[in-house]
Image (tube, rainbow, N blue to C red):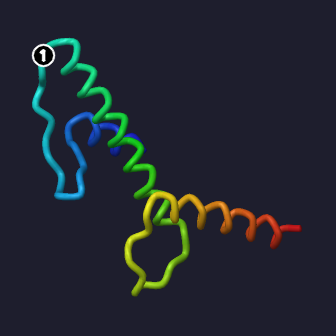
Amino acid sequence: MIQWQKFCDQHLITSEGVYEFVEEEGDRRAANVRERKRMCSINVAFIELRNYIPTFPFEKRLSKIDTLNLAIAYINMLEDVLR
């Protein structure tokens, strides 16, 4: 996770690709940078979570809501197996 934090401090992940941050000045711009870093860390968490959810190779990339729903179902299934 540490490597991703460093990545989020320096890059922005969008649907179009990955971009490097450009330092901005001013309170509003600083808030925008913080928000972009926050969203980057959330997106990275979803990327990592998708790696743990079993899917078929031919399936498209899961949306965030699908990822959360499948993660919940998978955790519940694993709990049932342990009982």
Is residue 10 shown above or below 27?
Answer: below
Query: Residue 63 appears at what percent x and percent y?
Result: 43, 64
Q: Quadrant of the N terminus?
A: top left
Q: Which quadrant holds the C terminus?
A: bottom right
Query: Which amino acid lies under the numbered mark 1 shown in the image of this protein?
Result: Glu
User: Where is mark 1, residue-wise?
Assistant: 25
Q: Quadrant of residue 21?
A: top left
Point 40% across, 58% down: residue = 47
Residue 35's place in the image compared with 47, above or below, is above
Viewer-proximal residue, 4 or 15? 15
Classify mark 1: residues with Cα within 10 Å, few (<14), some (14-19) or many (20+): few
State the image coordinates of residue 60 (x, y, percent, origin top left): 38, 77
Please indicate whether residue 29 sits to the left or right of residue 41 in the image.
left
In the image as oriented, which residue stretches furthest toward the bottom? 58
In the image, residue 53 lies at what x, y percent?
54, 69
Q: In this view, does 60 lie above or below 38?
A: below
Residue that extends furthest to the top in the rendered view of this protein: 27
User: At 25% from the left edge and 27% from the top edge, which residue is drawn?
Assistant: 32
Left or right: 29 as drawn, with respect to 63? left
Element class at badge 1: loop
Query: At 24% across and 49% down in the image, what residue appears?
Result: 13
Using the image, determine if residue 12 lies above or below residue 82. Answer: above
The answer to which quarter of the image holds residue 29 is top left
Residue 70 is left or right of residue 35, and the answer is right
- The part of the image, by quadrant, that contains residue 77 is bottom right
Which residue does the image show at 79% across and 64% down from the upper left? 79
Residue 51 vs residue 70, the one in the foreground: 70
In this figure, what is the number of numbered marks? Answer: 1
